[in-house]
Structure formats: C-alpha cells, structure tokens
Amino acid sequence: MRPTILSLFAMLSLCHGAAGNDEYLLRVDTIGYLDSTEEVPKESVLHSIEVLARANETFHSKVSVGSETLIMSGKLHQQDGEFRVQFRSTHSVDTGTVIRGAPPVSNKTGVQTTVVVAAGKSIVIGDVTATRDETTDKSEIARVKSNKRFVLLLSEYQPPAE
C-alpha cells in the first residue's frame, strides 16, 4: 500500500511539472542606507524576503530574525502573458519598549501597492526618505539621512537540480 501512495505522489509531481511552469519567485529587496551623515551615502541591500508564488493564487511569507520581522503577502495575477501583483510588505523592529496591556512597541516600514511587472524584470514599488538634524559631540549640527527603496523582482521558478 505504501509504495502505491508514494508512486501516486511521484506521478502527480511529474504531471504537474510537465503541465508547465506556473510557479514564480517574488523577491523584495530593500536597498538604501540608514542614519548616514555622508554627503553621498553608499547604498546596500538592507534586507530581502522572497516567496514562491503560483499564478492566480495568494502568497504569504514571514521571516523573523532577532528583533526584526519581514512579512510579504498578496496575490499574483496572470492574464494574457501579463503579471499584476497585489502586494503588501512590512519590516518591523521591536524597540524593546513595553506598555502594560498593549503589544510591544515596534518601528514599522512598509509598502502596499498593485503593480504590473514582466517576468525577469524588477520594478521599484516604493521609497522612504527621512532627514533629521542632530547635535554632534563638538556641538555642531549634522544632517542625518536615511533612505529605503523597495524593489520587486518576479522570475520564473527554477527548481534546484538534484
């Protein structure tokens, strides 16, 4: 009985693979810099999250590392060779502040949008910029800048070779 069930699962997997690739990898890179006093700050990838999505179905992914949490959810629509992504992504950092009777306080940054994107292409889906003045140790005023750009990449999923 057990070999028959395993054979059935293997056959279903093969049939699904032969029917065509309707699985896609959605990745959001947050690119930018935080709390920089440089005139032209150097950008880097601050964090990334990706999820395997099927055409015309919802997707959801959540990653927690230390005090940081990344969440991505939405729906990938495919029609006439075009992809439309209804999308929501948040990045939160637990500040360590607790107020009695309330959830922990966190700093959140996120984006919610619907975009049209081609497979193999990336698109900027949001941008957050902040500037503030701080007093330095030498009693000077320093301009502190932060910038985050959210970039969505859609690509056809290629399973790893076995």
Image: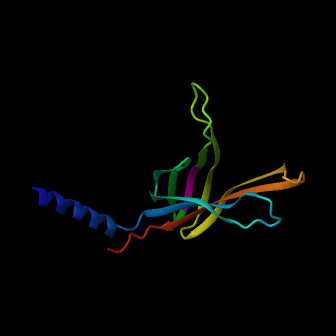
Residue sitting at x 84%, y 55% = 143
- Is 86 included in the stretch rendered in magenta? yes
Q: In this rendering, would 153 be left or right of 55?
A: right
Q: Residue placed at 62% from the left, 57% from the top?
A: 115
The quadrant in which the N terminus is found is: bottom left
Viewer-nearest residue: 92 or 13: 92
Q: Residue furthest right?
A: 140
> Is residue 63 depicted above or below 45 in this figure?
above
In magenta, the rendered stretch is 83-89
In front of the other: 99 or 121: 99
147 vs 79, left or right, is right
Q: Going by the picture, which residue comes out furthest to the bottom?
A: 161
Task: Say if the magenta span includes residue 92.
Answer: no
| Quarter of the picture holding the C terminus | bottom left
The picture quadrant where one finds residue 15 is bottom left
Foreground residue, 25 or 66? 66
